[in-house]
Image: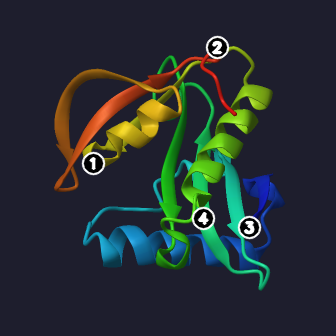
Amino acid sequence: MLQYSCLPFSGLSLEELYEVMAVRQAIFSVEQDCAYLDADGKDETAWHVLGRSEQGEIMTYARLLPEGIAYQEYASIGRVLSMQAVRGSGEGRRLMEFALARCAALWPGKAIKISAQAYLLDFYNSLGFTSVGEPYMEDGIPHVAMIWRSHALVK
């Protein structure tokens, strides 16, 4: 099982920031072959969830954004990733449960909006997210907007 932490941008060391950028590039730019500007100017306002192995490697990650940064009326969770070594182990669920709990603590009562890859709809539904709107393409991958409200059950 991974050890989770949630740090503001100012709480990340230079080494941690480098690790975060490296895992995000490994998954989104290399593995998913998406060309986009990852350093989008939102990291400084974000809280960063790091799931580390016993050896200290980042295996899961998510970026938590306050209301008004990604979406006008919603907080957001984005850049969600699991490294290949932990896929299928349940750590993706643990990551999202931890991220939702941190969002609820940071921004009590605030609904959360995500842009979910369409193939993960059932996973996000199982966490209490509800689809809104029609599917759309983002960086060449089908996505669906989803909302989580603070009253949704998180185990």
Q: Residue at x 75, y 19 (%)?
A: 108
The answer to whether residue 108 is left or right of residue 125 is right
**CB within 8 Å, label 2 to label 4:** no
Please name the amino acid that badge 1 sits on: Tyr
**Nearest the eye: 97 or 72:** 97
> Furthest-bottom residue in view?
55
The answer to whether residue 22 is left or right of residue 134 is right
Q: Secondary structure at mark 2?
A: loop
**CB within 8 Å, label 3 to label 2:** no
Q: Mark 4 or mark 1: which comes first in sequence?
A: 4
**CB within 8 Å, label 3 to label 1:** no
Residue underneath mark 2: 151
Q: Secondary structure at mark 3?
A: loop
As measured in the structure, the alpha-carbon distance from the residue carrying label 4 to the one carrying label 1 is 18 Å
Q: Which mark is residue 60?
A: 4
Q: Position of residue 123 (x, y in %)?
A: 43, 42
Mark in front: 4 vs 3: 3
Mark 3 surroundings within 10 Å by alpha-carbon count, few (fewer than 14), some (14 through 19), many (20 or more): few
Please name the amino acid that badge 4 sits on: Thr
**Nearest the eye: 45 or 95:** 95
**Nearest the eye: 18 or 118:** 118
As measured in the structure, the alpha-carbon distance from the residue carrying label 1 to the one carrying label 2 is 25 Å
Residue underneath mark 1: 119
Q: Which mark is residue 1?
A: 3
User: Relative to residue 17, is residue 49 depicted above or below?
Assistant: above
Please name the amino acid that badge 2 sits on: His
As measured in the structure, the alpha-carbon distance from the residue carrying label 3 to the one carrying label 1 is 25 Å
Q: Position of residue 145 (x, y in %)?
A: 33, 30
Mark 1 surroundings within 10 Å by alpha-carbon count, few (fewer than 14), some (14 through 19), many (20 or more): few
Q: Mark 2 or mark 4: which comes first in sequence?
A: 4
